[in-house]
Image: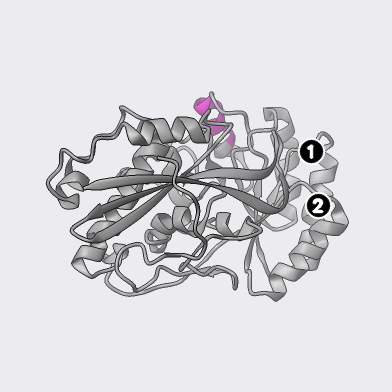
Amino acid sequence: MKARLRTARLELAEPLRISRSVMTARDAVWLSVEHDGVTGHGEAVSSVYYGLDAATLVRLISAVDLARFPDPESALEDLPSGAVPPAVTAAVEAALLDLVGKRAGVPVHRLLGTEASFGVATARTIGITSLTHAAAEARRLAAGGFGVLKVKAGSPDPEDDVERVRVVRDAAPRARLLLDPNGAWSVAQAERLLPRFAALGVEAVEQPLPPGDPDTLGALAERSPLPVIADEDAVSAADVRRLAGRVHGVNVKLAKCGGVRAALRIAELIEGSGTELMLGCLTASSLGIAPAVHLADRAPWTDLDGHLLLAHDPWRGIGGTDGVVRPSALPGLGVEEVTAHADVA
């Protein structure tokens, strides 16, 4: 097998502000793996939070020795994990899944055991922004078919968050609302604010407390008036094992846990525990989001809108502009590139 790497800059359509940062762009590294004239693709994206820039991703992905495997099927079977960051494992696995699916002539969701095609409503994120802009975005998104809106929280003044949710609720009265403070609140703040958000019709809250104390998060979930979903506290399977049955959901991002197979192991781990699966993502292109879309029929909550936040998506094939993501029926991941970029490795 031959591997090739390229990089691209993914510019956001508008700055995305969350409690800990403002993002305007993200770097993507694309891995292409070719075998017997067929090519599979995968994507990893840079992350300040996880300490991964494009140069580091290129170096780490380049170090994964795929040439030692006779074919992509055996590489997928024996792909090691743990030696490199989960984002690297997820990108390599995605390229191999794409390649194996293309060689078999079936989409990835069929490789994973789902025969029928499906579509799943995805949340669409509204960042920490002005009340006027939040209301306008909610109105526009609801009119475009989005039935689930995720509102970022964690403003210096919590009253701003309450008012933002209030104007979003007024602008999109039939939408399901999720809330994500990205770990910005203390326990006292969470206990004071969560009943107010519940009264506004928020369906669930992601990671209200700073990560690093899953016991405190679990204790808050026990007395919370709305479901608590762990995100930054639920990175690995070991993290999820500690939280299973204590929180209402875990947000599984493939770049965070290590890919599709790791996500499936987490789904199996929480089955029957009372903790539900949420599929999330980083801001990425359709190529980076596609592997999770092929799993989306398994999650009560789906937040796979990273490609929808871009000014220009250089890949296509998973939909989402109408509020519904759909795995393509084409073989592999079912995405195709619409813009060419220069090779870097």
Give the residue furthest to the right.
Answer: 132
Residue 183 location, x and y as percent? Answer: 64, 33
Which residue: 70% across, 43% down? Answer: 194
Residue 279 visible: yes
Label 1 sits on a secondary structure element that is loop
Residue 302 location, x and y as percent? Answer: 51, 58
Image position of 226 (left or right of 300) = right
Image position of 343 (left or right of 99) = right
Residue corresponding to mark 2: 164
The magenta-colored residue range is: 213-220
Image position of 158 (left or right of 10) = right
Which residue: 20% across, 64% down? Answer: 103
Which residue: 59% across, 38% down? Answer: 207
Image position of 267 (left or right of 11) = left
Disc 2 marks a residue whose amino acid type is Arg
Q: Is there a contact, CB below 8 Å, between mark 2 and mark 1?
A: yes
Q: Is residue 214 magenta?
A: yes
Which residue: 37% across, 40% down? Answer: 258
Rendered position, 64 above or below 285: above
Residue 129 location, x and y as percent? Answer: 80, 49
Q: Quadrant of residue 75?
A: top left
Q: Main secondary structure of the magenta part?
A: helix
Q: Is residue 45 magenta?
A: no
Give the distance between the C-alpha atoms of the residues marked 2 and 1, in whole angstroms.
10 Å
Q: Which mark is residue 155?
A: 1
Disc 1 marks a residue whose amino acid type is Ser
Q: Quadrant of residue 19?
A: top right
Label 2 sits on a secondary structure element that is helix
Compare residues 74 and 176 and report the one nearer the observer. 74
- How many circles with numbers are drawn on the protein? 2
N-terminal of the pair, mark 2 or mark 1, is 1
